[in-house]
Amino acid sequence: MRSYPVNSPEAAARIVALALIADGHVSLIEIDTLQRHDIAQRLGLSAEAFRDVLHGLCEDLQVQAPMAWTDPSRIDPRLIGDLIDDIDDPGLCAELIQLCRTVIEADHHVADGEALMLSTAFVHWHRRLSPQGASHRTARAA
């Protein structure tokens, strides 16, 4: 899997790209939504740089986690968690949840893979970033 600096525009774009492909395909409605909401620019990237991140994610997933694209819900939640770990800024986490929801809900249908991706991100970040999660991590480390 490609490595990006924590909280970088590329790491953030990879989360949105994961939401784009979570149902096994990228629809024209989702592409239009990306453009209408200036999602690449909001993440600090050009549209071309966002496409490069999306393309890189697809390549990495084919190598790291080959899956039957007829069943996109098979993306391993642990792999999703690993990608989500590249984001630890609470404000950016909240922004990414909103951007992912915008993309996922663009076609007025939430597929199983999309629901899995979004819920995994939400739960993962909530556990890592909430005060209770932080105290639980500190207690486990001691």
Image: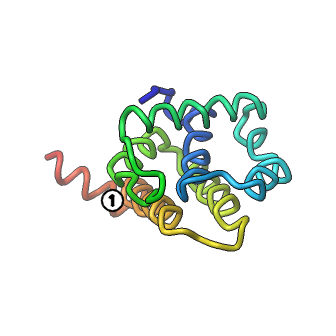
> Where 122 falls versus 75 (above or below)?
below
The number of numbered discs placed on residues in the rendered structure image is 1
At 36% from the left and 41% from the top, the residue drawn is 65
- 25 in relation to 102, above or below: above
Q: Which part of the image, by quadrant, shows the N terminus? A: top left
Where's residue 120, x and y in %? 42, 60
Q: In this view, does 17 lie to the left or right of 75?
A: right
Label 1, residues with CA under 10 Å away: few <14, some 14-19, many ≥20: some
Q: In this view, does 98 lie to the left or right of 75?
A: right
Q: Residue 33 or 12: which is nearer the viewer? A: 33
38 in relation to 62, above or below: below
Q: Which residue is drawn at 53% across and 37% down?
A: 58
- Residue carrying label 1: 133
Tell which of 136 and 86 is nearer to you. 86
The amino acid sitting under disc 1 is Gly
Q: Name the residue: 59% across, 41% down.
A: 12
